[in-house]
Image (cartoon, rainbow, N blue to C red):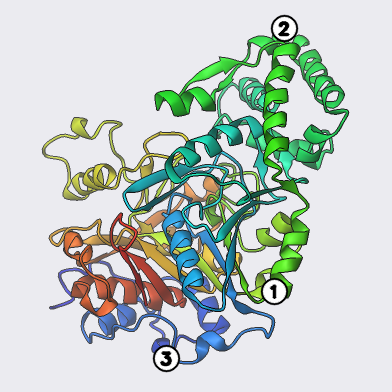
């Protein structure tokens, strides 16, 4: 194969040499990849695509060079892009791997951020589940799901979700724990999200589930936590909350009782978005009483710090930390202002558990999707314009646009929580490198390798131009709207052939090279790949 057909851009600046990329050096190399993302591209491309240097995974021995407190039985999985990367599949795989270790008798699966604004899909033995607040791990009797302190929990929705899961997998009794200090999310926060959007005259994104007001009220100390719902004076506290917000709305001639909010119970039943009104204070409290009674009966609310202390002291317990959303949505490090409301990096584990720190985790894996997507109002530099309905795409549309429409349908690119079509983007390496840098990740997992076509090149952004010069990624949509992405086209591969493969060396050659190219360009080892929707469509490198 020659490089001329695919290497379609001309880069400015000098080409770095003697970088010894195949040995995967540490921080200095990664800093250069961030600071000069446009350099050494030709060297990397020729090494992989001309000289067949297909080097993937950890160099021998390097995975063990970590802080002495890091342990193999502690694993973290987060999204490396804008969410929707397919993290649930990887989490499920890591749980399974831990339980195959004869030394591990039980696994805790910990959600440390977000609420039911997040969705993750898992599948096993023909059973497919869309989870929202409940952590992955429901297929395993020796796994306990922990909804931790960093989450925003809606008890009404949680009851609906648990009922839905138990219909498919059986009782979860004793296998779900909820932090008593998690933020309490109710219809009041959902009404506040609606109210805030009305004041702005337009929405700035969100799922209408009141997650942002829930976290905001925690920070200004006006919100409640799960423990408050179980307290003896719960009715007084929640009643006062209702009265305070009702008084605020009355100042704007709005009746709180009539504000329409999402109805998760009816949505699950009808499989389409349903709504209802907040209702009067009496109706609001009556619904919470039912949810409160359910939570008390389940005996699931506890001080989760005690569970973490137990995990650290007992070597027979493994822990998988499951992040929601992606690094690109972090409130401080993400695509401002279209971000989420809780920390999405590995640093979020500390605040989200009030105990663990990232340095305890030997595996800190950021997941990226081969065909990136997101749900939100943002438009990334690599955004692919598509009509709302793929059938509306003109027959003479450009090949890349037709390919993107095909990806959207084949990969079922709809938000697990919202049901909205996701926006598709080309792979954005500067964006990814920044996210890896700030997230405390130490390795990469890549999903959807089976969503590819042999005759369609894969476009990858390798840098941005602004005012005739290269600029680095910044987490600021106003800035990103001013840049022009520069692309390289990489040869495609037969995605369907990937689904039958269980070893990296058996993947189509161009799929192997694509993975190797990503590892060289980012400086992070690629250690896990998914090659289809099935539970067994996964490759550990």
Q: Is residue 264 left or right of residue 296?
A: left
Of residues 350 and 426, the one nearer the viewer is 350
Mark-to-mark CA distance, 3 and 1: 41 Å
Mark-to-mark CA distance, 2 and 1: 57 Å
- Residue 173: x percent and y percent? 60, 46
- Residue 461: x percent and y percent? 36, 61
Q: Which residue is mark 2?
A: 253
Q: Is residue 250 left or right of residue 257?
A: right
Residue at 72% over, 7% down: 253
Give the answer, above or below, for where 308 lies relative to 419: below
Q: Which quarter of the image is occupied by the N terminus?
A: bottom left
Mark toward the start of the polypeptide (3 vs 1): 3
Residue at 17% over, 45% down: 398
Disc 2: CA contacts within 10 A as few (<14), some (14-19) or many (>=20)? few
Q: Which residue is mark 1?
A: 314
User: Secondary structure under badge 1?
Assistant: loop
Residue at 49% over, 22% down: 266
Q: Which residue is mark 3?
A: 20
Mark-to-mark CA distance, 3 and 2: 67 Å
């Amino acid at each position: 194969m020659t490089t001329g057909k695919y290497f379609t851009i001309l880069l400015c600046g000098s080409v770095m040499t003697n970088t010894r990329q195949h040995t995967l050096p540490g921080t200095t190399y990664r800093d250069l990849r961030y600071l000069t993302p446009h350099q050494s591209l030709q060297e990397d491309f020729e090494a992989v695509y001309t000289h067949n240097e297909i080097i993937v995974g950890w160099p021998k021995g390097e995975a063990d060079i970590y802080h002495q407190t890091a342990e193999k039985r502690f694993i973290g999985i987060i999204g490396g892009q804008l969410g929707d990367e397919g993290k649930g599949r990887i989490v499920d795989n890591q749980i399974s791997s831990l339980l195959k270790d004869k030394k591990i008798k039980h696994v805790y699966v910990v959600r440390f951020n977000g609420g039911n604004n997040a969705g993750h899909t898992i599948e096993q033995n023909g059973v497919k589940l869309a989870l929202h607040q409940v952590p992955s791990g429901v297929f395993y009797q020796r796994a306990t799901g922990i909804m931790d302190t960093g989450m925003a929990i809606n008890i009404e929705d949680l009851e609906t979700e648990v009922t839905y899961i138990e219909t498919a997998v059986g009782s979860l009794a004793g296998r779900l724990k909820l932090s008593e200090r998690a933020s309490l999310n109710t219809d009041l926060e959902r009404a506040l999200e609606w109210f805030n959007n009305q004041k702005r005259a337009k929405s700035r994104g969100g799922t209408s589930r009141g997650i942002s007001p829930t976290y905001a009220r925690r920070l200004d100390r006006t919100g409640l936590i799960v423990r408050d719902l179980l307290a003896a004076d719960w009715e007084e506290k929640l009643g006062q909350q209702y009265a305070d917000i009702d008084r605020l709305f009355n100042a704007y001639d709005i009746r709180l009782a009539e504000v329409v909010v999402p109805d998760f119970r009816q949505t699950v039943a009808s499989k389409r978005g349903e709504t209802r009104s907040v209702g009067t204070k009496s109706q609001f409290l009556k619904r919470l009483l039912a949810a409160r009674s359910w939570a008390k009966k389940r005996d699931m609310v506890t001080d989760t710090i005690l569970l973490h202390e137990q995990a650290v002291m007992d070597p027979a317990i493994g822990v998988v930390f499951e992040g929601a959303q992606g690094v690109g949505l972090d409130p401080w490090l993400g695509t401002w202002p279209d971000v989420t409301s809780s920390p999405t990096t590995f640093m979020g584990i500390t605040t989200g558990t009030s105990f663990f720190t990232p340095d305890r985790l030997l595996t800190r894996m950021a997941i990226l999707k081969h065909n990136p997507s997101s749900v939100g109002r943002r438009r990334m530099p690599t955004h692919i314009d598509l009509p709302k309905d793929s059938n509306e795409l003109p027959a003479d549309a450009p090949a890349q646009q037709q390919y993107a429409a095909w990806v959207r349908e084949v990969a079922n690119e709809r938000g697990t929580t919202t049901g909205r079509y996701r926006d598709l983007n080309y792979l954005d390496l500067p964006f990814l490198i920044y996210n890896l840098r700030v997230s405390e990740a130490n390795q990469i997992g890549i999903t959807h390798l089976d969503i590819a076509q042999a005759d369609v090149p894969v476009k990858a952004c390798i840098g941005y131009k602004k005012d005739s010069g290269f600029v680095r990624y910044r987490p600021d949509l106003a800035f990103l709207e001013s840049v022009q992405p520069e692309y390289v086209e990489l040869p495609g591969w037969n995605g369907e052939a990937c689904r039958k493969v269980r070893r990296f060396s058996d993947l189509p050659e161009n799929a192997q090279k694509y993975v190797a190219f990503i590892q060289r360009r980012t400086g992070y080892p690629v250690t896990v790949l998914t090659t289809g929707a099935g539970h067994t469509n996964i490759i550990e490198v």
